[in-house]
Amino acid sequence: MNLVRPIAAPGRPAAATLGLFDCDIHPRVRDLAEFRPFLSDAAWHRLVTYGIHARHGFAKGYPFPKAAPLACRRDAWPPGGGPPASDLPFLQAQLLDQHGIDIGVLNPLQPSGQGDVNDPLSVAMARAVNEWQVEHWLRHEPRLRGSIVVPYEDAAAAAAEIRHWAGDDRFCQVLLMSRTSEPLGRARYWPIWQAAAEAGLPVGIHAFGYSGHAMTNGGWPSFYIEEVQEHATSAQAQVASMVVEGIFDRFPGLRVLMIECGFGWMPSLAWRLDGAWKRLRDEVPHLTRAPSEIMREHVFVSTQPIEEPERPEHLLDTMEWIGWDNILFASDYPHWDFDDPRLAVPSFIPEAKRAAIFGGNARRLYGL
């Protein structure tokens, strides 16, 4: 557990001349009863009687314990009770006001129903979470935008959920997890990509989720530190799948944001894919461009957790390869690895590029 202590005077970073934009905030219900108005009697009965059953090899609970309760900052519990990020006034004061955030994107995690083994419950929960975002957050705070939570293992239902909210400016992206039952480039997920492309919405792919498979090639690891490291490898697998399966050629306007996955893996993945593609192009005739070119055009990344190599030029080279326009600031509030925007982006990065990371890039990606 950690305690984040305020530094200097509150306010936005001086470099954020285009407005500070946080692409990763995790709201949570105070208790499940907040979902009740948005669920049918049957769905509510199933939720409170049998609960959510994620795809993993354990009867209940998380496969590995977090480093702190709910993986959150020790100072993030609202004074009026409830879990972190469940109280709008406290979130406004501790995050939006304290750090001068102009726009923040809500990425609801569990309990969202995403990836639940019971598809009808997953569908019902996704709609409830989206309605809850509107009623408890977006209706009351114009600085916040929502993510369309979808039951991604039921692609047809997920596409219908996207189309239901398409055109509602309070939502700025579609939200998926990085660990799905199959790689996201597979045809079973194409309806999701099509619906997002039709709506003109980027798709945020957040680290974690439960695929039903161990996160390593050899089975379940022993420690949580191993699971955290696998966020990057799950992101690599998803990007490789989307590129090689031709998702971005099929939907050329589609943009994907990898959230909380790091980004140091991007160049090496592209180099390896490019090398394999040169020798195996006849296997994938639909792939008419080098994978690296597709990745630079369609794949965006977030700063939290940003890699911090001992030699700053290594980070600069990586960010240069990804593209300075493709990197967005993320705080990961209220989690223990929260990034204060005044410290999140290293000071050796040129000021104009820092300003784009803090705000301009997100505004272009989301069309705001």
Image (tube, rainbow, N blue to C red):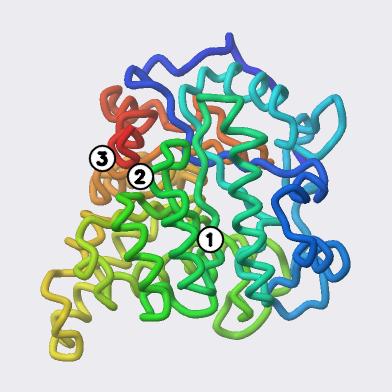
Spatial CA distance of label 2 from label 3 is 15 Å
**Residue at (64% x, 36% y) in the render:** 135
The amino acid type found where label 3 is placed reads Asp
State yes or no: discs 2 and 3 in contact (Cβ < 8 Å): no
Is residue 214 shown left or right of residue 269? right
Q: Earlier in the sequence, mark 2 or mark 3?
A: 2
Work out whether 365 lies above or below 158: above
| Residue 216 vertical placement versus 360 (above, below) | below
Q: Which residue is mark 3?
A: 325
Q: Residue 85 in the image: state x and y as whole percent.
A: 70, 36
Q: Is residue 51 above or below residue 142?
A: below
Give the side of residue 41 with respect to residue 116, left or right: right
The residue shown at (75%, 37%) is 84
Who is closer to the viewer here, 12 or 122?
122
Amino acid on which the number 2 mark rests in the picture:
Leu
Q: Which sits earlier in the primary sequence, circle 1 or circle 3?
A: 1
Which residue, given by chain and number where applicable, does mark 1 sit on? 150
**Which residue has dot 2 on it?**
315
Q: x%, y% of residue 46?
A: 81, 68
